[in-house]
Amino acid sequence: MLKSLMNPVSDKFSRVTEASKPRLTETLHVPCAPWDPARVHHIGLFLGEGVGPEVVRVAASLLEVLSQATSRRFEIHEGGLIGLPAKELYGSSLSSEVIGFAEDIFDRGGALFCGPGGDRFVYEMRRQFDLYCKFTPIEPLIELREAGQVRPEVVASADIIAIREGMGGIYQGSWEEVDVEGDRVARHRFEYRESMVRRIVDVAIKLASSRRGRINVVLKPGGIPSISSMWRRIAQEMTQEAGTALAELEIDNAVFQLIANPGQFDVVLSPNMFGDVLADCAALLLASRGLSYSGNFNDRGNGVYQTGHGAARDIAGKDVANPIGQILSLGMMLRESFCWPEADAALRQAVRETLQQGKCTGDIAMPGHEVVGTAEFGQLVKANLERLLADAA
């Protein structure tokens, strides 16, 4: 299915009050290309599985509103099955059909916007397209400081960007199950190359230099000695040369410190599996996993955007999923891949105003707030976005 979103009206975002955020991808070796007014913005959209179709459709409706207030031209291309449904049909959670679809979108200078996909979809996507850098913003919304399990004064101190290396480590190894002397043995082999570590440390240094100048690298020297030693040596060498402050934490302590004292962190850098653990843990600071999101990037200007909450199959189709993470991932895509920070700011402001009006989904319910469903929350955000853009005109 192909849907064209075009409007000749010039951009009108001058009165959107949410501050525009800088592009994280400027710290990559090859940042995403600047916007060319003559270029169509191609978006490859995957509805995903579980709650994916519900939350992705909310985000897509907001993109349509944004498109009507700009001279930018968008074309949305809907992709096929990903995750477990794809594995059941094709034998792989990342099918050759989807690979070809993604290659076509990337060749057009576009980006992928994904609902959740299970099994090994995200790992294989990273491997297929060398999506080595994953940025996960940990920036709690002021309106939700009292909605989660962590004390509001602790949440208020959190302003973190987590950087996760995506091409090495245990998630990208090789594995087998064999018989050895009558016993069944599961084996897994994985590695890190020095060049892989250097390129992700370089990204962290560049990002830290544009923020508060601090990097925490997360390792486990006693448990994974060789990999931790390589990461430590390279991080120390490169940060010392760059004049960037570096601290090291072991993964178990890092998980504790992230919740106990998030204000000590600025840029958190970690190998593949540790980054996965930290990102899920950090969702406690956001009040719900339904607000977590991220972008995966390579040095060819390709980006893949997704939420961090998974398929949540147990609540699929019940109209209770929180679409905020999917909305914020849309904003991240517009900012990073299409150089449109004003649209990101407008989406954030519309979400915040909806929360300020006392409306929320059940996972972030607070006293005095009305719990609404996924679709209704999306409609409320849409109405606020339309009003913001009308005021800006």
Image (cartoon, rainbow, N blue to C red):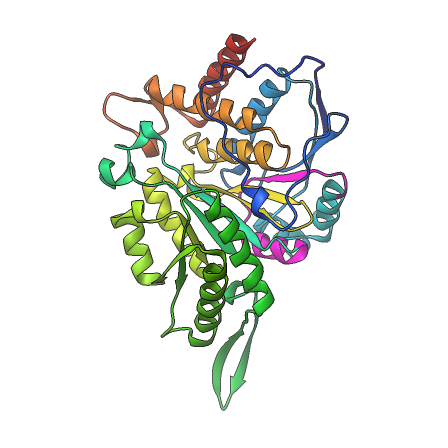
Residue numbers of the magenta segment: 107-129
Q: Nearer the viewer, residue 13 or 45?
A: 13
- Which quarter of the rendered picture does the N terminus lie within? top right
- Which quarter of the rendered picture does the C terminus lie within? top right
Where is residue 314? Give x, y as percent.
42, 43
Identity of the residue drawn at 42% across and 76% down: 225
Where is residue 149? Give x, y as percent.
25, 41
Query: Is residue 49 shown to the viewer in this render?
Result: no
- Residue lying farthest to the bottom in this orientation: 181
Residue 272, placed above or below residue 289: below
Identity of the residue drawn at 38% across and 68% down: 220
Q: Nearer the viewer, residue 15 or 109?
A: 15
Q: Is residue 163 left or right of residue 113?
A: left
Residue 291, placed above or below residue 268: above
Q: Nearer the viewer, residue 105 or 266?
A: 266
Q: Any magenta on residue 121? A: yes
Residue 185, placed above or below residue 342: below
Marker count (numbered):
0
Q: Is residue 124 left or right of residue 271?
A: right
Q: Any magenta on residue 244? A: no
Where is residue 160? Give x, y as percent.
40, 44
Q: Is residue 356 left or right of residue 198?
A: left
Q: Nearer the viewer, residue 79 or 333?
A: 333
Identity of the residue drawn at 50% across and 25% down: 345
Where is residue 271? Give x, y as percent.
48, 61
Query: Is residue 200 shown to the viewer in this render?
Result: yes
